[in-house]
Image (cartoon, rainbow, N blue to C red):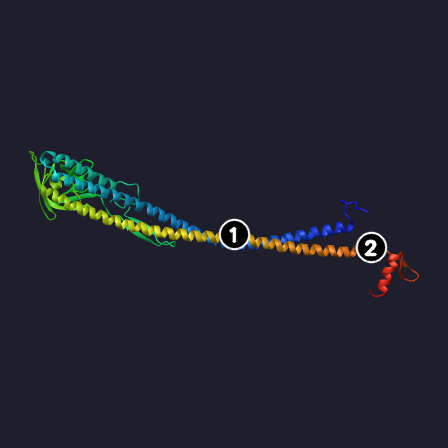
Amino acid sequence: MTSAIGGLGGFDFQRASVLAGIQQQFNQRVAEKMAVSNSDYAAKINNVNRDTDKWEDFQGELGDAKKIVKGAVGRLESMMSLVDNLIQTVNKARLDPEIDTTQEGYRSTFDSYLKSIRSRADYSSDSPNLLGNIGLRDLAIPVSVHGARYSVYQNYMGTSYNITDTEGYVWRPDYAGDLLRRYESYPDDATNISGNLANGLRLDGKTGDEITFTVAPDSAGETQYTGTLTVEGNGIVEAWYYDGLGTEVGRERAMVDLDAAYATLKNQLQSYKGIVTTIEFQEARASKLLKNIGDKTIALALEQEKASAKIQKEGQQQLNAVADAIAFNQAMGSLYVSMFSLYTYDGNSNQLVGNSTAARIFGAFVDMGV
């Protein structure tokens, strides 16, 4: 006989109802355990991610600093190449038998290379410009994720100079106007006295840092001044200071300054290369630590998955055990009902009386204590 509800018997329906309630309770219990487990792992992963953020920021700052220092390295190499060109220009002038007539070409070439050196040093989008002499003065390079820094200071590698004359005036190059200009107070109070850097100046004498020079030589307005020369940057001056490369003395003076400039640039280059190496070491260290942190994050995620799977498995096993117990109890109940249907109650004897051969056989077993 079938039940009117979904084709289920009474026991089946009762069992399904009980299991549905138990299933809900177990699902809630499993969800609670997984929430606790996931919260623990989320805290661990967040701690790891905080370390990740610190090291990624550290790595980014290192990369920014390295870009600036490597930019300076590249410009220094270019400037050293230009100094080589200057040396070759002086040597060509030295070997030129027609130097009296070709001097202007060598002078012009010399000043053109010097202008390129200034350009390499002075003009850069890097901030700070480590080879310039304006703007930010130092570059802070990180050495730890905790904020420690060390500074690389700006070191001017271009070319400039000033002359303080005996009257207290200051002479400085005005490269935009191609002039050596006299100032009452630099840079605000310029006088109307100046000499053209190409052909309006002549060096008359030099003793140590003291020089004597003439403005507008070989003209009605020529004027001689004496002052103290102070060089800035790599120490090279325009060709007028080297007699326009037209004399052996001037060329020798140029070679001394060019050799010193080359050594200065080379020393600075080696220093910055060393800084790049240090930065790259720190970058490699940061990359290794970030990889370790990444591996730890992956390991924690896998542990979290395993923990969740274990909680679900244990919950399902417990639920299956309860379902099996209910099924067993219901099966025993059905057996007892079937057994007792073989008997009728005898009111006179107050006993169950078997109605069939099977009942009488079962009764015999009971009587024998089976």
The image quadrant where one finds the C terminus is bottom right
Task: Specify whether residue 168 is in view.
Answer: no
**Residue 291: image tag:** none
Q: Residue at x 21, y 38 (%)?
A: 115
Question: Quick check: 5 above or below 334?
Answer: above
Please give the residue where the numbered disc 1 appears in the rendered image. 301
The quarter of the displayed image where residue 159 is located? top left
25 or 100: nearer the viewer: 100
Task: Specify whether residue 30 is in view.
Answer: yes
Please give the residue where the numbered disc 2 appears in the rendered image. 338
Query: Label 1's element?
Result: helix
Q: Is residue 123 left or right of residue 143?
A: left
What is the three-letter code of the residue carrying label 2?
Answer: Ser
The quarter of the displayed image where residue 39 is located? bottom right
Which comes before the other along the chain, label 1 or label 2? 1
Question: Quick check: 338 above or below 232?
Answer: below
